[in-house]
Amino acid sequence: MSDGLRPSITRALRDPPALASCNLRQWEALVLEARRTNLLSRLAHEMAERGLLDRVPPAPRAHLVAAQTLAQGQADAMRREVTYIRKALARIGIDIVLLKGAAYLMAGLPAARGRLFTDVDILVPFERLPEVEAALMLHGWFATHHSAYDQRYYREWMHELPPLRHAVRTTVIDVHHAILPRTARLKPASAKLLAASRPIPGEDRLRVLSPADLVLHSATHLFLNEELSQGLRDLADLDSLLRHFGDDPGFWNELPQRAVELDLARPLHYGVRHAARLFGTPVPGAARSNIECLAPPPWLDGIMGALYERALQPVAPGEPGPLTPLARQALFMRAHWLRMPPMLLMRHLVSKILRVDHDRDHSRASPDI
Amino acid sequence: MILADLSRSELERRLAGPGLRLRAGPVVTQIQSPLGAVADGVALHYAAHPIEGSDGFADFFVRVDRPRNLRRWLHPQAVFYIDGEAPFTPLPLDQAFPLLEWGLNWCISAHCHQYLIFHAAVVERSGRALILPAPPGSGKSTLCAGLIHRGWRLLSDELALIDPATSHVIPLARPVSLKNRSIDVIRAFAPAAVLSRPVHDTTKGTVAHMQATPDSVRRAAEFARPAWIVMPRYEAGATAALTTLPKARAFMEMVNGGFNYSVHGRKGFEALARVIDLCACHTFVYGDLEEAAKLFDALATKS
């Protein structure tokens, strides 16, 4: 790699053959950064596609092989899980719109290759939520967030049911009725998303969002989510979707229009800008200027650009520069700000602070093995 | 270069500063910790292990440290960090070395999917591996600790790493974790065994670690071929006895103790089936360690 001891995962993903000149020390830094950004399996996939894995020295290669195995295992598990969900919902006769990872995988999109999967996300019409929840519970899923506050938080304010966990498989499903909280400032209409969704060929009752909507949802997820530590992985998804659908010339015309139609103009602007900056996503000139028109006023655009640039950098252990956590904090606050009106936000934050110890005890595992 | 070649002050300097790069079997871990209990544990248990310079490749970056909060003055605690993140709840400071050991187990079981990983002890004789899968409290670690003081080589006490392509068991040669009464049992059974100071009131009760035998550490690059799967169970007063375990049941017992069996999918099934085919499978009950060791001695020499 060109600049001494700092190879970066984004550069590695853009140009895997250049890794041939890496020494062990550079591989060490790269594997660590890739692991921390959840992009190790993506890198392994890109290397394997090009037949480059065998040329990697044995120690880093072991990590790439391990990550590839994990991603394959998770993809298999995701396919099985989607089958179970489809069976559970068969009797209520509903079309299931898969979101995010599950959608990329079942629709056979390149964004699924070498990707890690966790929960299944689905989108259904708001008025059918009770039926869907009941059908899932009948088939072994149960609610995870039991406190009255959490139930209210999800059911009144959020865009999804409290996550449901399967009693035997311990897998989690998030049932969405919208892609942003009900309290959010931006209001993408779920009816429009559902109407434009498409069946997955050969998969009865399974659908995915239209190409433009898949991209817009990915951008929204990245830029309105509080968790920016996974930001690079989300941006890698966005890059892959844009490259895949970008071959169709009509796509780039439709995308900015659709963003305006769905009230998602700014997430698209930020998403495309940072994907192009970090992953070199090709964007045709005309589309680039159309999307530039969606930008906020220059002073705000400058601040936001700088914040994201910083927050999307992975933090290396041992050198936690103060700026990256600060930028993430600022964007965390902003994401909350965009998700809820001020008074509601205040209530939510106070409630979270009062319960912080309680939450922490459940969020971390014991190392006991 | 092995760890014992470092002076105590150099060891402490590396642990508190740039990190100590320690090899255990195929895994190199960079360990950082300013805590005396960690330096003591590492010096005692990893004396014979190779250490590596900073020009090589470290698989994991771990740190055991006090948490940065006010509690440190009231109830001193230790936190395990991997790659800069703290995935576990902190433990009392006294448990810093066991925490490091458990954290290292976690690094391997959560990341090293190039192997099939099972919760089992493994010992070796004449290139043949004896795999001891069993739930906690069954007497697996006691039996493992006993056998390595009666002619068997330690491959691993907690994690059986199996290469799915070759079926080989890959040694780790890290310390054996002994719990509660088995600490005194091993002290009496093998006076030469080197044990760390017991740590009380952990989630597993009282815990002490036992040094891997020097021969096990020296030969950590020598793989072994699975030959027996034996599920041990300690029962006070029982006569040592092996009972044949049907292969299908042995298979399911291994699956139940698998850390990443499901990750490997069909290839994992096929690889485990090959391992089961290579092995004689038994359950084993014992009440006396000496008797148990004699029985395994006979098993190893007769077949």
Image: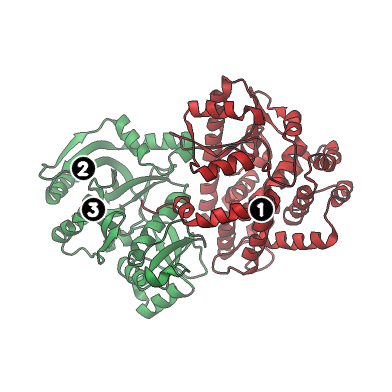
Marks 2 and 3 share the same chain: yes
Characterize the local packing of mark 3: few (<14), some (14-19) or many (20 or more) Cα atoms within 10 angstroms: many
Q: Residue at x 22, y 56 (%)?
A: B180
Q: Nearer the viewer, mark 3 or mark 1?
A: 1
Specify the amino acid type for callout 1: Met
Mark 2 chain = B
Letter of the chain in red: A
Disc 3 designates what residue? B152
Say which mark, if any, is on residue B233: 2
The mark tally for this picture is: 3
Mark 1 chain = A
Disc 1 designates what residue? A343
Letter of the chain in green: B
Specify the amino acid type for callout 2: Arg
Circles 2 and 3 in contact, beta carbons < 8 Å: no
Mark 3 chain = B
A269 relative position to A155: left or right = right
**Residue B138 locus on image (x, y percent):** 24, 45
Specify the amino acid type for callout 3: Trp
Q: Hey, which quadrant is residue A367 in on the image?
A: bottom left
- Callout 3: helix, strand or loop? loop
- Callout 2: helix, strand or loop? strand
Q: Cα distance, mark 1 to mark 2?
A: 60 Å
For the question of whether residue A117 can be seen, the reply is no
Marks 3 and 1 share the same chain: no
Q: Cα distance, mark 3 to mark 1?
A: 68 Å
Name the residue nearer the viewer: B188 or B147: B188
